[in-house]
Image (spheres, helix red, strand yellow):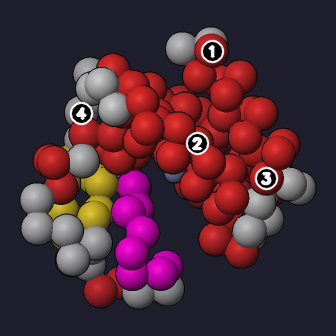
Amino acid sequence: MTDYQLKVRPWWLCCIPSGYWVTLRPTIYYPATVKDPTVYPNVIAHECVHIGQQNEGNFLWWLVRYVCVPSFRLRMEVAAYAAEADVCAKLGDANLASETVSQAAAALSSWKYCWAASSNNEAWAMIMAARRSL
Ligand SMILES: [Zn+2]
């Protein structure tokens, strides 16, 4: 299990849209509108994937690549959304798993992730492939 701590988003993350969860190892920052982040084990699983990614090498280099290289950002998010959907499925909510993949694919091919994926279909196929490899 990945070591992490949960904290409400601080003011200095104001440059990122307020509804987003943000992970800077080992801390997962959740939106102030979330009363109890522990009721979202699927999202925590997503963010723990990012902690693992950030722990693999140089943390600052990971951040730079995440921000600047769309294909890197896509690979990181595909792995995280696959894990998130997997938790939904394991908790018995196949509909939420499917919805997670669909919404992630749409988001990854939109402004929300600075068009990391070239299309919704590309992102969807990558997440589904990643889910099969879990
Ligand atoms: Zn993510």
Residue that appears at 27% across and 64% down: 30
Residue that appears at 33% across and 20% down: 90
Q: Badge 2: how crowded within 10 Å, few (<14), some, or many (20+)?
A: many
Label disc, if present, on residue 3 of the rendered structure: 4
Please identify, in this view, whether the residue under mark 3 or under mark 4 is nearer the observer: 3
Instruction: Specify the amino acid type for callout 1.
Output: Arg
User: Residue beneath label 3, please?
Assistant: 120
Of 14 and 121, the residue lying toward us: 121
Instruction: Specify the amino acid type for callout 3.
Output: Asn
Q: Is residue 22 magenta?
A: yes
Of 112 and 70, the residue lying toward us: 112
| Mark found first going from the N terminus, 3 or 4 | 4
Instruction: Specify the amino acid type for callout 2.
Output: Val
Residue 58 location (% of width, % of height): 57, 42
Q: CA distance from mark 2 to mark 3?
A: 10 Å
| Mark found first going from the N terminus, 2 or 4 | 4
User: Residue beneath label 2, please?
Assistant: 101
Q: Is residue 83 magenta?
A: no
| Mark found first going from the N terminus, 2 or 3 | 2
Q: Is residue 2 left or right of residue 6?
A: right
**Local SS, label 4:** loop
Figure check: 67 above or below 54: below
Figure check: 90 above or below 124: above
Instruction: Specify the amino acid type for callout 4.
Output: Asp
Looking at the rendering, the stretch of residues picked out in magenta corresponds to: 16-24
Q: Is residue 68 visible?
A: no
Q: Is residue 76 left or right of residue 109?
A: left
| Mark found first going from the N terminus, 3 or 1 | 3
Q: CA distance from mark 3 to mark 4?
A: 32 Å
| Mark found first going from the N terminus, 1 or 2 | 2
Of 75 and 66, the residue lying toward us: 75
